[in-house]
Image (cartoon, rainbow, N blue to C red):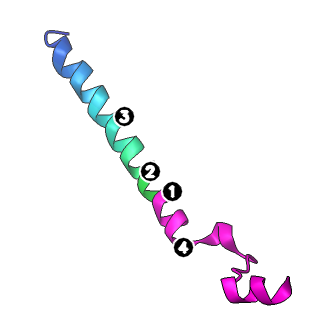
């Protein structure tokens, strides 16, 4: 290999792009709020009326 620095930079770019794609997918999952399925948000008024 004549240009090892370019090989190293190429590998780093590929790793960076991989993590960029993975994080974007996780962000979409977070925004879709799948993890909040079945969660019921109680209003303050409902809490006060119950106690």
Give the image quarter of residue 39: bottom right
Pick the quarter of the image with the C terminus: bottom right
Point out which mark residue 32 bears: 4
Pointer 1 local density, CA inside 10 Å: few below 14, some 14–19, many at least 20: few
Residues in magenta, as a range: 27-51
Which percent across, then down, holds residue 15?
A: 36, 34
Residue located 80% across and 90% down the image: 49
Residue with the most extreme left position: 2
Residue with the most extreme top position: 2
Residue under label 2, please give it: 23
Question: Is disc 2 placed on a helix, strand or loop?
Answer: helix
Pointer 3 local density, CA inside 10 Å: few below 14, some 14–19, many at least 20: few
Classify 16 as above or below 21.
above
Mark pair 2, 3: CA separation: 12 Å
Classify 25 as above or below 15.
below
Q: Are marks 4 and 1 in contact (CB under 8 Å)?
A: no
Point out which mark residue 2 bears: none
Residue located 18% across and 15% down the image: 5
Which percent across, then down, holds residue 29?
A: 54, 64
Residue located 20% across and 10% down the image: 1
45 or 31: nearer the viewer: 45
Of discs 2 and 3, which sits in the foreground? Answer: 2
Residue under label 3, please give it: 15
Question: Is disc 1 placed on a helix, strand or loop?
Answer: helix
Q: Is residue 16 left or right of residue 46?
A: left
Q: Earlier in the sequence, mark 4 or mark 1?
A: 1
Which percent across, then down, holds residue 14?
A: 32, 36
Residue located 37% across and 47% down the image: 20
Q: Earlier in the sequence, mark 3 or mark 4?
A: 3
Mark pair 4, 1: CA separation: 10 Å
């Amino acid at each position: 290999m004549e240009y090892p620095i370019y090989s190293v930079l190429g590998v780093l770019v590929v790793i960076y792009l991989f993590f960029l794609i993975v994080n974007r997918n996780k962000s979409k999952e977070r925004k879709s709020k799948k993890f909040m399925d079945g969660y019921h948000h109680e209003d303050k008024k409902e809490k006060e009326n119950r106690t």
